[in-house]
Amino acid sequence: MRRYGKNPDEDDIRVRPNRKGNRPRTHIRPKHEDAAEGMVLTVDRGRLTVLVDDRVVMAMKARELGRKAAVVGDRVAVVGDLSGKKDTLARIVRIAERTSVLRRTADDDDPYERVVVANADQLAIVTALADPEPRPRLIDRCVVAAYDGGLEPILVLTKSDLASADKLLETYSTLDIPYVVTSREEFTDGAELARVHELLDGKVTAFVGHSGVGKTTLVNALVPEAQRRTTGHVNAVTGRGRHTTTSALALPLAEVGGWVIDTPGVRSFGLNHVDPSRVILAFPDLEPGTEGCPRGCSHDEKDCALDAWVAEGHADPQRLYSLRRLLATRERREDD
Protein backbone atom coordinates (compact mmCIF):
# COMPACT_ATOMS: atom_id res chain seq x y z
CA MET A 1 0.00 0.00 0.00
CA ARG A 2 1.35 3.39 -0.99
CA ARG A 3 2.24 5.65 1.97
CA TYR A 4 2.58 9.33 1.25
CA GLY A 5 5.12 11.59 2.88
CA LYS A 6 4.49 14.77 4.82
CA ASN A 7 4.16 16.84 1.64
CA PRO A 8 0.44 17.05 0.78
CA ASP A 9 1.10 18.67 -2.60
CA GLU A 10 2.48 15.61 -4.33
CA ASP A 11 1.12 15.28 -7.84
CA ASP A 12 0.20 11.64 -7.54
CA ILE A 13 -2.16 12.05 -4.55
CA ARG A 14 -5.66 11.05 -5.63
CA VAL A 15 -8.54 13.25 -4.46
CA ARG A 16 -11.98 11.66 -4.39
CA PRO A 17 -14.51 13.90 -6.19
CA ASN A 18 -17.50 15.30 -4.31
CA ARG A 19 -20.47 13.70 -6.09
CA LYS A 20 -23.04 16.01 -4.47
CA GLY A 21 -21.28 19.10 -5.74
CA ASN A 22 -21.55 20.86 -2.39
CA ARG A 23 -18.85 22.14 -0.07
CA PRO A 24 -17.06 19.56 2.09
CA ARG A 25 -18.09 19.47 5.74
CA THR A 26 -15.91 21.26 8.27
CA HIS A 27 -15.63 21.33 12.04
CA ILE A 28 -15.07 25.08 11.98
CA ARG A 29 -18.26 26.83 13.01
CA PRO A 30 -19.12 30.50 12.46
CA LYS A 31 -18.75 32.74 15.51
CA HIS A 32 -21.99 34.65 14.87
CA GLU A 33 -20.52 37.84 16.28
CA ASP A 34 -23.49 39.82 14.91
CA ALA A 35 -26.10 37.66 16.68
CA ALA A 36 -28.88 39.47 18.53
CA GLU A 37 -29.53 38.88 22.23
CA GLY A 38 -32.92 37.62 23.38
CA MET A 39 -34.82 35.88 26.19
CA VAL A 40 -36.68 32.58 25.80
CA LEU A 41 -40.37 33.04 26.65
CA THR A 42 -41.67 29.53 26.04
CA VAL A 43 -40.71 26.20 24.47
CA ASP A 44 -43.11 24.05 22.47
CA ARG A 45 -42.03 20.85 20.69
CA GLY A 46 -38.66 22.11 19.55
CA ARG A 47 -39.83 25.62 18.70
CA LEU A 48 -38.81 28.42 21.01
CA THR A 49 -40.48 31.80 21.34
CA VAL A 50 -37.80 34.43 21.96
CA LEU A 51 -38.15 38.11 22.84
CA VAL A 52 -35.61 40.11 20.81
CA ASP A 53 -35.81 43.82 21.64
CA ASP A 54 -39.57 44.42 21.38
CA ARG A 55 -40.27 41.64 18.88
CA VAL A 56 -41.40 38.08 19.52
CA VAL A 57 -39.42 35.75 17.28
CA MET A 58 -39.93 32.05 16.58
CA ALA A 59 -36.66 30.13 16.67
CA MET A 60 -35.12 26.68 16.76
CA LYS A 61 -31.89 25.42 18.28
CA ALA A 62 -28.86 25.42 15.97
CA ARG A 63 -27.19 22.08 15.29
CA GLU A 64 -23.86 23.20 16.73
CA LEU A 65 -25.43 23.41 20.21
CA GLY A 66 -25.65 19.63 20.25
CA ARG A 67 -27.65 18.29 23.19
CA LYS A 68 -27.58 21.59 25.04
CA ALA A 69 -31.18 22.75 25.32
CA ALA A 70 -32.57 26.22 26.01
CA VAL A 71 -35.36 26.64 28.54
CA VAL A 72 -37.68 29.44 29.57
CA GLY A 73 -35.69 32.32 31.02
CA ASP A 74 -32.50 31.57 29.12
CA ARG A 75 -30.57 34.47 27.60
CA VAL A 76 -29.69 33.42 24.07
CA ALA A 77 -27.98 34.68 20.92
CA VAL A 78 -30.18 34.51 17.82
CA VAL A 79 -29.43 34.79 14.09
CA GLY A 80 -31.54 34.60 10.96
CA ASP A 81 -34.89 36.23 10.32
CA LEU A 82 -35.58 38.38 13.39
CA SER A 83 -38.53 40.27 11.94
CA GLY A 84 -41.06 38.31 13.98
CA LYS A 85 -43.30 37.95 10.94
CA LYS A 86 -45.52 34.93 10.42
CA ASP A 87 -43.84 31.75 9.08
CA THR A 88 -40.32 33.04 9.77
CA LEU A 89 -37.77 31.09 11.77
CA ALA A 90 -34.54 32.14 13.43
CA ARG A 91 -31.76 30.03 15.01
CA ILE A 92 -30.44 30.04 18.55
CA VAL A 93 -26.65 29.75 18.29
CA ARG A 94 -25.55 30.42 21.86
CA ILE A 95 -26.94 30.08 25.38
CA ALA A 96 -25.49 32.47 27.95
CA GLU A 97 -24.23 31.27 31.31
CA ARG A 98 -27.11 30.88 33.74
CA THR A 99 -27.30 32.80 37.02
CA SER A 100 -29.74 30.32 38.56
CA VAL A 101 -31.42 27.07 37.58
CA LEU A 102 -34.60 25.46 38.91
CA ARG A 103 -34.33 21.69 38.42
CA ARG A 104 -36.48 18.73 39.31
CA THR A 105 -36.54 15.00 38.74
CA ALA A 106 -39.64 12.86 38.28
CA ASP A 107 -38.91 11.17 41.63
CA ASP A 108 -35.99 10.65 43.99
CA ASP A 109 -34.82 7.53 42.12
CA ASP A 110 -34.78 9.19 38.70
CA PRO A 111 -31.21 10.13 37.65
CA TYR A 112 -32.44 12.37 34.84
CA GLU A 113 -32.89 15.97 35.95
CA ARG A 114 -35.12 18.40 34.11
CA VAL A 115 -34.35 22.10 33.99
CA VAL A 116 -37.65 23.91 34.51
CA VAL A 117 -36.58 27.57 34.48
CA ALA A 118 -33.30 29.46 34.08
CA ASN A 119 -32.17 32.85 35.42
CA ALA A 120 -35.08 33.36 37.82
CA ASP A 121 -34.46 35.43 40.96
CA GLN A 122 -37.28 33.95 43.02
CA LEU A 123 -39.45 30.86 43.33
CA ALA A 124 -43.02 31.59 44.38
CA ILE A 125 -44.40 28.41 45.94
CA VAL A 126 -48.18 28.65 45.61
CA THR A 127 -50.17 26.58 48.11
CA ALA A 128 -53.87 26.52 48.90
CA LEU A 129 -54.84 26.47 52.58
CA ALA A 130 -57.83 24.28 51.71
CA ASP A 131 -59.45 22.65 48.67
CA PRO A 132 -56.94 21.05 48.13
CA GLU A 133 -55.26 20.65 51.52
CA PRO A 134 -51.68 21.98 51.82
CA ARG A 135 -48.85 19.49 51.28
CA PRO A 136 -45.93 20.57 53.52
CA ARG A 137 -43.59 17.90 52.13
CA LEU A 138 -44.02 19.30 48.61
CA ILE A 139 -43.40 22.82 49.94
CA ASP A 140 -40.20 21.57 51.64
CA ARG A 141 -39.00 20.04 48.41
CA CYS A 142 -39.62 23.24 46.46
CA VAL A 143 -37.73 25.21 49.12
CA VAL A 144 -34.77 22.82 48.85
CA ALA A 145 -34.80 23.05 45.04
CA ALA A 146 -34.84 26.86 45.29
CA TYR A 147 -31.88 26.94 47.68
CA ASP A 148 -29.96 24.44 45.55
CA GLY A 149 -30.61 26.36 42.33
CA GLY A 150 -29.78 29.83 43.61
CA LEU A 151 -33.35 31.17 43.87
CA GLU A 152 -35.00 32.89 46.83
CA PRO A 153 -38.20 31.07 47.89
CA ILE A 154 -41.48 32.92 48.51
CA LEU A 155 -44.65 31.43 50.01
CA VAL A 156 -47.93 32.44 48.37
CA LEU A 157 -50.83 31.01 50.38
CA THR A 158 -54.21 31.12 48.68
CA LYS A 159 -57.85 30.56 49.75
CA SER A 160 -57.42 31.99 53.26
CA ASP A 161 -61.18 32.46 53.34
CA LEU A 162 -61.45 28.66 53.68
CA ALA A 163 -58.78 28.04 56.35
CA SER A 164 -56.29 29.89 58.56
CA ALA A 165 -52.66 30.29 57.50
CA ASP A 166 -51.25 30.48 61.05
CA LYS A 167 -50.24 26.84 61.48
CA LEU A 168 -48.49 26.60 58.11
CA LEU A 169 -46.68 29.92 58.57
CA GLU A 170 -45.43 28.78 61.98
CA THR A 171 -43.77 25.78 60.33
CA TYR A 172 -41.66 28.03 58.11
CA SER A 173 -41.18 30.97 60.48
CA THR A 174 -37.53 30.15 61.28
CA LEU A 175 -36.60 30.10 57.59
CA ASP A 176 -37.43 33.81 57.21
CA ILE A 177 -39.17 33.15 53.89
CA PRO A 178 -41.20 36.12 52.59
CA TYR A 179 -44.87 35.29 52.28
CA VAL A 180 -48.24 36.67 51.26
CA VAL A 181 -51.66 35.32 52.21
CA THR A 182 -54.51 35.81 49.76
CA SER A 183 -58.22 35.06 49.72
CA ARG A 184 -60.33 34.55 46.64
CA GLU A 185 -62.66 37.52 47.18
CA GLU A 186 -60.14 40.12 48.34
CA PHE A 187 -57.59 39.18 45.71
CA THR A 188 -60.19 39.43 42.97
CA ASP A 189 -61.04 42.93 44.23
CA GLY A 190 -57.36 43.91 44.03
CA ALA A 191 -56.90 44.58 47.76
CA GLU A 192 -54.00 42.13 48.07
CA LEU A 193 -52.36 42.72 44.68
CA ALA A 194 -50.17 45.50 46.10
CA ARG A 195 -48.44 43.10 48.51
CA VAL A 196 -47.82 40.57 45.74
CA HIS A 197 -46.49 43.30 43.43
CA GLU A 198 -44.14 44.42 46.20
CA LEU A 199 -42.60 40.94 46.36
CA LEU A 200 -42.25 40.69 42.58
CA ASP A 201 -41.02 44.23 41.90
CA GLY A 202 -38.17 44.15 39.37
CA LYS A 203 -37.60 40.41 39.80
CA VAL A 204 -37.91 37.34 37.59
CA THR A 205 -40.21 35.04 39.57
CA ALA A 206 -41.09 31.45 38.71
CA PHE A 207 -44.44 30.23 40.03
CA VAL A 208 -44.76 26.58 41.05
CA GLY A 209 -47.53 24.59 42.73
CA HIS A 210 -49.67 21.53 42.26
CA SER A 211 -52.91 21.73 40.31
CA GLY A 212 -55.95 23.37 41.84
CA VAL A 213 -54.14 25.75 44.22
CA GLY A 214 -54.99 28.85 42.20
CA LYS A 215 -51.56 29.44 40.65
CA THR A 216 -52.77 30.30 37.17
CA THR A 217 -55.65 32.37 38.57
CA LEU A 218 -53.04 34.37 40.44
CA VAL A 219 -50.94 34.81 37.29
CA ASN A 220 -54.01 35.96 35.34
CA ALA A 221 -54.71 38.60 38.00
CA LEU A 222 -51.11 39.83 37.82
CA VAL A 223 -51.01 39.82 34.02
CA PRO A 224 -54.64 40.35 32.90
CA GLU A 225 -53.80 40.32 29.21
CA ALA A 226 -52.42 36.77 29.50
CA GLN A 227 -55.62 35.01 30.63
CA ARG A 228 -54.11 31.55 30.86
CA ARG A 229 -56.57 28.70 31.24
CA THR A 230 -57.35 27.78 34.87
CA THR A 231 -58.22 24.38 36.32
CA GLY A 232 -61.55 25.29 37.94
CA HIS A 233 -61.98 21.76 39.31
CA VAL A 234 -60.49 19.76 42.18
CA ASN A 235 -61.14 16.02 42.39
CA ALA A 236 -63.15 15.29 45.55
CA VAL A 237 -61.42 11.91 46.04
CA THR A 238 -57.75 12.75 45.38
CA GLY A 239 -57.90 16.43 46.33
CA ARG A 240 -55.97 17.31 43.19
CA GLY A 241 -56.86 19.40 40.18
CA ARG A 242 -56.36 18.82 36.48
CA HIS A 243 -53.27 20.11 34.72
CA THR A 244 -54.28 22.98 32.43
CA THR A 245 -50.96 24.83 32.08
CA THR A 246 -48.96 22.49 29.84
CA SER A 247 -45.80 24.52 29.27
CA ALA A 248 -43.83 27.18 31.12
CA LEU A 249 -44.39 30.74 29.90
CA ALA A 250 -42.66 34.01 30.82
CA LEU A 251 -44.97 37.03 31.09
CA PRO A 252 -43.90 40.66 31.65
CA LEU A 253 -45.17 42.57 34.68
CA ALA A 254 -45.95 45.94 33.15
CA GLU A 255 -46.90 47.73 36.37
CA VAL A 256 -43.86 46.97 38.53
CA GLY A 257 -41.33 45.62 36.04
CA GLY A 258 -39.91 42.14 36.15
CA TRP A 259 -41.30 38.84 34.89
CA VAL A 260 -43.65 36.09 36.02
CA ILE A 261 -42.94 32.58 34.77
CA ASP A 262 -45.99 30.33 35.02
CA THR A 263 -45.06 26.63 35.11
CA PRO A 264 -47.26 23.52 34.74
CA GLY A 265 -48.80 22.11 37.91
CA VAL A 266 -46.68 19.44 39.59
CA ARG A 267 -47.72 16.32 41.49
CA SER A 268 -44.20 15.45 42.58
CA PHE A 269 -40.88 17.24 42.90
CA GLY A 270 -37.96 14.80 42.86
CA LEU A 271 -34.68 15.91 44.45
CA ASN A 272 -32.28 13.26 43.17
CA HIS A 273 -30.13 16.01 41.66
CA VAL A 274 -29.74 18.08 44.85
CA ASP A 275 -26.34 18.30 46.52
CA PRO A 276 -27.04 18.49 50.29
CA SER A 277 -23.89 20.56 50.79
CA ARG A 278 -25.52 23.39 48.84
CA VAL A 279 -28.59 23.57 51.04
CA ILE A 280 -26.50 24.67 54.03
CA LEU A 281 -25.52 27.79 52.04
CA ALA A 282 -29.06 29.08 52.63
CA PHE A 283 -28.35 29.02 56.38
CA PRO A 284 -25.51 31.54 56.82
CA ASP A 285 -25.99 31.49 60.61
CA LEU A 286 -25.29 27.73 60.67
CA GLU A 287 -22.64 27.43 57.96
CA PRO A 288 -19.67 28.44 60.18
CA GLY A 289 -20.55 25.58 62.53
CA THR A 290 -19.89 23.00 59.80
CA GLU A 291 -16.12 23.62 59.87
CA GLY A 292 -15.74 20.89 62.48
CA CYS A 293 -17.92 18.39 60.60
CA PRO A 294 -16.34 15.18 59.27
CA ARG A 295 -15.81 14.89 55.53
CA GLY A 296 -19.06 14.21 53.69
CA CYS A 297 -21.17 15.03 56.73
CA SER A 298 -24.91 14.95 56.01
CA HIS A 299 -25.50 17.35 58.95
CA ASP A 300 -27.94 14.86 60.41
CA GLU A 301 -25.66 12.30 62.10
CA LYS A 302 -24.00 11.73 65.48
CA ASP A 303 -20.64 13.29 64.57
CA CYS A 304 -22.14 16.47 63.07
CA ALA A 305 -20.50 19.52 64.62
CA LEU A 306 -23.67 21.59 64.33
CA ASP A 307 -25.14 20.10 67.51
CA ALA A 308 -22.30 21.45 69.66
CA TRP A 309 -22.25 24.73 67.72
CA VAL A 310 -25.93 25.36 68.42
CA ALA A 311 -25.66 24.14 72.04
CA GLU A 312 -22.98 26.79 72.62
CA GLY A 313 -25.53 29.44 71.70
CA HIS A 314 -24.22 30.39 68.26
CA ALA A 315 -27.57 29.84 66.55
CA ASP A 316 -31.25 29.15 67.19
CA PRO A 317 -31.97 25.41 67.69
CA GLN A 318 -35.11 25.82 65.58
CA ARG A 319 -32.95 26.84 62.64
CA LEU A 320 -31.01 23.58 62.90
CA TYR A 321 -34.29 21.68 63.11
CA SER A 322 -35.52 23.42 59.96
CA LEU A 323 -32.29 22.62 58.11
CA ARG A 324 -32.50 18.95 59.01
CA ARG A 325 -36.17 18.79 58.11
CA LEU A 326 -35.35 20.08 54.64
CA LEU A 327 -32.35 17.78 54.20
CA ALA A 328 -34.48 14.77 55.23
CA THR A 329 -37.28 15.61 52.84
CA ARG A 330 -35.81 13.33 50.15
CA GLU A 331 -36.56 10.35 52.40
CA ARG A 332 -40.17 11.35 52.93
CA ARG A 333 -43.13 10.90 50.65
CA GLU A 334 -44.55 14.17 49.40
CA ASP A 335 -48.11 13.33 50.41
CA ASP A 336 -47.25 12.49 54.05
Image (spheres, rainbow, N blue to C red):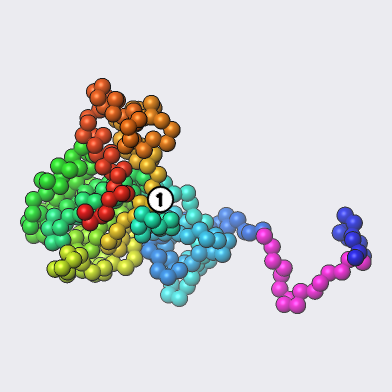
Judge left or right: residue 270 versus residue 318. right
Q: Is residue 17 magenta?
A: yes
Range drawn in magenta: 12-27
Q: How many marks?
A: 1
Q: Helix or strand or loop: what does disc 1 sit on? A: loop
Determine the residue located farthest toward the front in the rendered image: 302
- What amino acid does circle 1 point to? His
The residue beneath circle 1 is 273
In the rendering, at what x and y percent does residue 116 appear?
37, 57
Q: Name the residue located 10 percent from the left edge and 45 percent from the top edge.
A: 166
* Residue 71 image-quadrant placement: bottom left
Judge left or right: residue 256 versus residue 45. left
Determine the residue located farthest toward the bottom in the rendered image: 19
- In which quadrant of the rendered image does the N terminus lie? bottom right
- Front residue of 172/291: it is 291
In the rendering, at what x and y percent does residue 286 appear?
31, 31
Q: Overall secondary structure of the magenta stretch?
A: loop
